[in-house]
Amino acid sequence: MRGLVQPFVVLLAASVALQLASLLAVREIGLRTEQRRLLLSASDATRELLDRYESNMYLAVVGLSTSDWDLLLRQRKLAKALEAQVTQNLTALQRGGTAHLVGAEVSLLADDDPATKERLAAAEPLWAEVRTSAVRVLRSDNQSLRNNPDIERFQAASRRLDEALDALDADLGRRAGSDLLWLGRAQRALPVGSVALMLLLAVFVFRRILLPFDASMKDLARSEGALRVARDELERRVEERTAELSTANTELVAEREKLARANQELEAQREKLLRANTELERQEEALRRSNEELERRVEERTAELREAQQRSLELARQAGMTEIASNVLHNVGNVLNHVNTGSAMLAERLRALRVEPILKAAELLEAQKANLARFFSTDERGRRLPEYFGKLGQSLAAERAELVALVGGLEEHVAHIRAVVDFQQSYATVTNLDEPVDLAVILDDALRISMANVRRGGVVVERALSPLPRVLCDKHKVLQIVLNLLANAKWALDEREGDGKRLSVRLARPAEDRVRIQVIDNGVGIDAALLTKIFQHGFTTRKGGHGFGLHSSALVARAMGGTLAAESEGPGRGATFTLEFPFRPAGGEASA
């Protein structure tokens, strides 16, 4: 349950975090867009105030030239007010604060963009020049509106300030457009991300919860079907056994009548019957001890099987789900099928042991013990009883021989499991240490592990192992790579139709400092476009494959200082996998 809840909670938390991050990003972009819009509005308002300031200054000059002192003072006063507003707006644009817009005042934050700061810093001396030129115009002795150098300087300074504000408006407009573009993208990406995460959650619920639940329900239905079949079979066998008991009861009544007539004969054969009874008791005791011994041995073998299964599982976990453990468990599973079958047969034979006739005969003798001589002499049942005991003893002896044979078969299967597990243990410990290794032995072991039943699939295995000195390497890494390559080759051969399937394993030394291992098959082959992808993590063309076998093998080969490569002439033409790594002869052994 934890394996399902934890990924689901992680996905849900990721979804909520992404939504919050998206909303915060949209809010941040929206605030930036609004701030830049206010900056742009403040810049436009400043330009408008500057135009009005220029107009007031011109009207003041007109009043001065016409000696209209009232017009001069009024326009000068308006120009002073506009001058203060322009100064306040430029200060707010550069450092933040309150700015005058048309009919309103807004609070601005300073723009941290270097280009904006540079343009505002350049506009400040231009505004100072405009104000200085305006003062000179009003103080100049030349009161003409034409050919007046002071008015021309005032106009030039105003024009440069207006151009600087135009450039500022262009920058603010461009960044505001960029922010609006990002805001639109974020607003469009927010629902797309939400839908994608919901789809991901839906796929997770479907694959990790609904599909396993459906499979469990199907398994439950199959189990219920098998249980119904077993119950029907049990009822049928109970009915058959009831009929047999009814028939036996009828026969027993007839035998009792015969025993009554044979009471005189029973007395004459009393001594013989007593000896037979003693022998029967001895056989019963022997049978009881045999049954107890058989049960004890079955329990011991069952415990050994459980121990072998536990050892196999521990070895599989230590090997990290490698191909070694997979093949060993496969072989153990095959033997366990025989063990389970033998155990079921043994239990069935034990349950079917015919001890009821002995008990019935003993009851019959107990009922006639007062007149055994007449019973054995005159009663037909008494005369047939010694023969019956003889046949019963033979039947029990045959049953015992068959049970001993079944136990012997179980012992052989357990010994087989022990041999497989012992073989696995030789490769179970991961040491990551280089040691002297006979590569031919490693390849034989890999073939024995992976190709246990390959000949039954019509595959011819060829070995071309050149004799090489023992080399220094990590035998577990080499075995891991070869087992992965053999598993891929087996799959390629299984997918190929027809006869003539061949698998070749080669060992050679192409150079003085290199050793080469090749696994060649004539299976389904590999498309040329896939030769560069098959070693990528997660890539696989096998149904049910996990996509990390060849990837991990390539990484292991690289860690050994070697390479792992694949070649194929195309689909249906087979494939060749080549492992090369440095040849380092073991100390004290000559190079080949």
Image: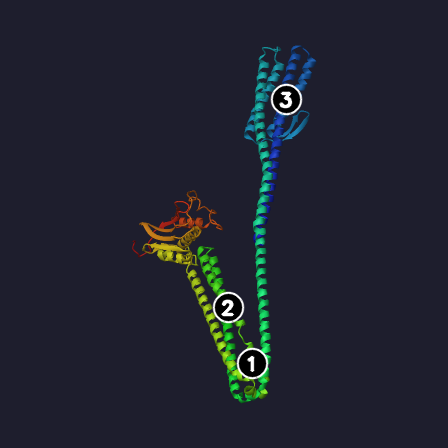
Distance (Cα) linking label 3 and label 2? 106 Å
Q: Residue at x 59, y 25 (%)?
A: 169
Q: Which mark is residue 345?
A: 2
Place of residue 176 in the rendered image (x, y in percent of width and height, measured from the top left): 59, 30
| 477 to the left or right of 1 | left
Question: In the picture, residue 168 is in which quadrant?
Answer: top right
CA neighbours of label 3 inside 10 A, class few (<14), some (14 to 19), many (20+): some
Which residue position is annotated with label 3?
A: 48
Q: Nearer the viewer, residue 32 or 129?
A: 32
In this rendering, is residue 235 above or below 219? below
Distance (Cα) linking label 1 and label 2? 28 Å
Q: Amino acid at mark 2?
A: Met
Place of residue 329 in the rendered image (x, y in percent of width and height, measured from the top left): 47, 59
| 486 to the left or right of 344 | left
| 526 to the left or right of 154 | left
Select label 3 or label 1 by which is in front. Answer: 1
Place of residue 127 in the rendered image (x, y in percent of width and height, measured from the top left): 59, 22
Q: Amino acid at mark 1?
A: Ala
In this rendering, is residue 97 above or below 494? above
Q: Amino acid at mark 3?
A: Glu
Q: Nearer the viewer, residue 42 or 372?
A: 372
Q: Which mark is residue 361?
A: 1
Q: Residue at x 51, y 68 (%)?
A: 345
In this rendering, is residue 539 above or below 378? above
Place of residue 231 in the rendered image (x, y in percent of width and height, measured from the top left): 59, 65
